[in-house]
Image: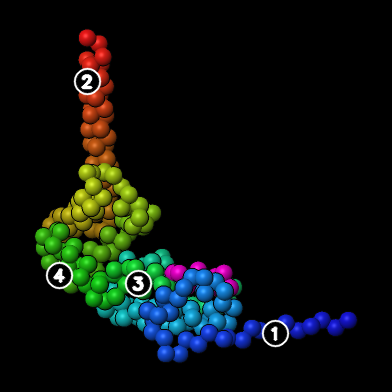
Amino acid sequence: MAKRKRTKAKATFNVTGLSISDIANIDPSRLNKMNKADLKRVVTRLNSAGNKRLKRLRNSFAGTMSPAYRFATGKNGRRKFSVRNKTRNQLLKEYSRVRDFLFNKKTASVSGWKKTRKGIEDIIERNLPKKKAKKFWSVYRKFVESRGGAGVIRSMKYSSSDKDTSDRILKLIAKEFLTNKKSEEDVLRALEAGVTREYEELQDKQNEDSNYKSLGRFFEFSD
């Protein structure tokens, strides 16, 4: 008995006339019910917008140092948004990835990345000359990646708050790289030493606080 040829599902969802925002806000239940052909058209539209953003960042000053750019392109910097050879489940994951990039990443646009850089210049209390800015961001990126990503940096409790930890790292890079004019390798070593030192100091302080609390409880219950 001859086998039936499997026919490809035809696209029935029309993306014509929909904005990128409309496509990014399709109801999840509707998205999950789409056949592969429809899903591919939807993701292709979002991917096109995402890849255009990547190109604009790539062609802008220090754009490839943007955390959002690194998130999208991976460590080798060559990854892009694509639907090629993806299964239906992989298309759903790609939809989430490009949607997150376009709408949840502050540094996914040239203007957003520029604003972030300006905010960091305010933190380190100096302007970054163009010649040194790329190296500054290169050092920061290498340190972040050596620690397992930005999420790990945000979770480092080496000081009183997450923001304080991030600010200290940025200031230390500025001090060692811009003021002391050290090489990238020396700055990274200084960062590791500085972070380790702060961590040990914080641990000592926490141990002291714990000892004081224990002492307080001793006097409280021994009268």
Magenta stretch bounds: 88-97
* Quadrant (top left/top right/bottom left/bottom right) for the N terminus: bottom right
The image shows residue 207 at horizontal and vertical percentages of 26, 29
Q: Is residue 133 visible?
A: no
Label 4 sits on residue: 129
Considering the whole magenta stretch, tell me its main secondary structure: helix
Between disc 2 and disc 4, whose residue precedes? Answer: 4
Residue 193 rendering spot, x and y as whole percentages: 26, 45
In this rendering, which labeled residue sits more in front, label 2 or label 4?
2
On the picture, is 62 further left or further right than 86? Answer: left
Tell me the residue that label 3 is attached to. 103
Mark 1 — residue?
7
Taking the view exactly as shown, the residue that stands out farthest to the bottom is 16
Circle 3: element type: helix
Q: Residue at x 25, y 71 (%)?
A: 113
Q: Amino acid at mark 2?
A: Gly
The answer, for residue 120, to whether it is visible in the render is yes
Q: Is residue 93 magenta?
A: yes
On residue 216, the disc is 2
Residue type pointed to by label 4: Pro
Q: Residues within 10 Å of mark 2 (few under 14, many from 20)?
A: few
Of circles 4 and 1, the one toward us is 1
Distance from label 1 to label 2 (Cα)? 77 Å
User: Going 34% across and 79% down the picture, which residue do you hit?
Assistant: 53
